[in-house]
Amino acid sequence: MSDLAVRVEHLQKIYKLYNKPMDRLKESLGLTRKRLYREHYALNDVSFQVEQGETVGIIGTNGSGKSTILKIITGVLNQTAGEVEVNGRISALLELGAGFNGEYSGLENVYLNGTMMGFSREEIDQRLDNILKFADIGDFIHQPVKTYSSGMFVRLAFAVAINIDPEILIVDEALSVGDVFFQAKCYHKFEEFKEMGKTILLVSHDLGSVGKYCDRVVLLNQGVKVDEGDPKKIVDLYKKILVGQEKPQEDLQAEHVSIAQAGECWKDHLQINPQLLEYGEKKAEIIDFAILDENGLITNTVDKGSVCQIRMKVHFFTEVQEPIFAYTIKNLRGTEVSGTNTMYEDVSIPPQGPGDERVVTFEQKVDLQGGEYLLSLGCTGYRDGDFHVYHRLYDICNLTVVSIKNTIGFYDMNSQIRVE
């Protein structure tokens, strides 16, 4: 038997994009010889192999072809060109609701999915207790799945996927809707699968989980494989792509943009929130800002345990007696989890006049748990004893903390453990 679980060779998937539905109809009826469409390469000459027992991650920006390649491997889509070879029974969790009938109860869908995988009713009966125990959705198993929350849906789908004895498990972002305890249970199951010699193919935006659980990572961008290899190396390369997404494909492996190389605007090299909230008197204005990793490179992604910098450039239009510079970090639910300002840190800023500019850098070790956060910046101050807001930028950009070890709560207390 082959040592390869999955082999992908020169895979290509092309979609025809039409400007209007009538063009598609004209072509299908043979009413024109003109080419009325343009080609979009969802995948272009992608090749990689997955050995039996490997856990391989596939990462990349939105639209890079991650989900497309999984759908081709599982047979949901047909490729335009190239070859795919699969050795082993696949269980796939591609997207919320895939393979489920909304009108059927959860229990009926368990039997439906098992039958589609080639199991008899008796074989499904033997696995049913394990499926129900893992899903842990109680009496909802007898209700139509269209009434399920997204969390209940994915619990049942994952429970079915892992309890039908797959040789190859394929998961596409499905765990992102589960709660933290369910995700922990799923990843524990991943480790059991690895010990059993099962093969796992995982698509995820959770770079911490990719780094922790994957033996190897494949990086896609704009339908092309950029590189594959050691998780840390590929995650670092992905961070560079996130910084310079506007670069041509041949430049994607170039270095991050550093402060010295950033040109006029550091913020142009960050992912900015289009829905940010901005207000203030504008007697002073935050005209530029950056997040810098431990290597001094501009990025939205930093490693837990590393030292990063949050930097802002402020221009003053009028005299400001006692300026205060601040930043705040919030989680995606809007809870402020960290932040400080020059007043709290007892850093005295002298009065500023029209035309003055100041660059302020906050430097600290990143002990936040891995995850997604939002950064806010501010310039405030006191004038004649009264507090004034000169310029605030709320949720200006995301901050992704990559971690291979999370503890409880917002922060890691970096405990030192001694057992005697």
Image (cartoon, rainbow, N blue to C red):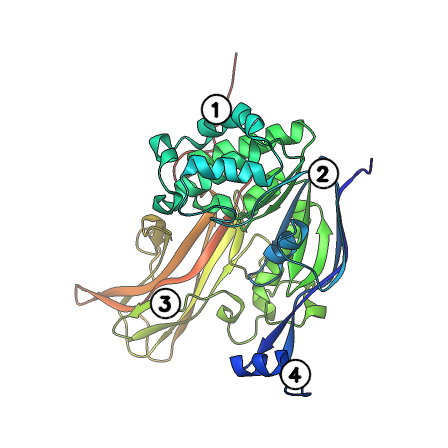
Return the x and y of residue 361 as percentages of the image width and height: 45, 59
Residue bearing the label numbered 1: 129
When the figure is inspected, residue 105 is found, relative to residue 71, above or below; the finding is above
In the picture as drawn, the residue positioned furthest to the left comes out as 385
Residues at marks 1 and 3 touching, judged by CB atoms closer than 8 Å: no
**Type of amino acid at the residue the image marks with label 3:** Gln
Q: Nearer the viewer, residue 270 or 53?
A: 53
Q: CA distance from mark 2 to mark 4?
A: 42 Å
Residue bearing the label numbered 2: 88
- Residue plotted at (59% across, 55% down): 67
**Type of amino acid at the residue the image marks with label 4:** Gly
**Type of amino acid at the residue the image marks with label 1:** Asp
Secondary-structure class at tag 2: loop
- Residue plotted at (35% across, 73% down): 285
Q: Nearer the viewer, mark 1 or mark 3?
A: 1
Along the polypeptide, which appears first: circle 3 or circle 2?
A: 2
Residues at marks 3 and 2 touching, judged by CB atoms closer than 8 Å: no
Residues at marks 1 and 4 touching, judged by CB atoms closer than 8 Å: no
Q: Nearer the viewer, mark 3 or mark 4?
A: 4
The quadrant the N terminus occupies is top right
Residues at marks 2 and 1 touching, judged by CB atoms closer than 8 Å: no
**Type of amino acid at the residue the image marks with label 2:** Gly
Q: Nearer the viewer, residue 304 or 203?
A: 203
Secondary-structure class at tag 4: loop
Q: Residues within 10 Å of mark 4 (few under 14, many from 20)?
A: few
Secondary-structure class at tag 3: loop
Q: CA distance from mark 3 to mark 2?
A: 46 Å
Residue bearing the label numbered 4: 30
Q: Residues within 10 Å of mark 3 (few under 14, many from 20)?
A: few
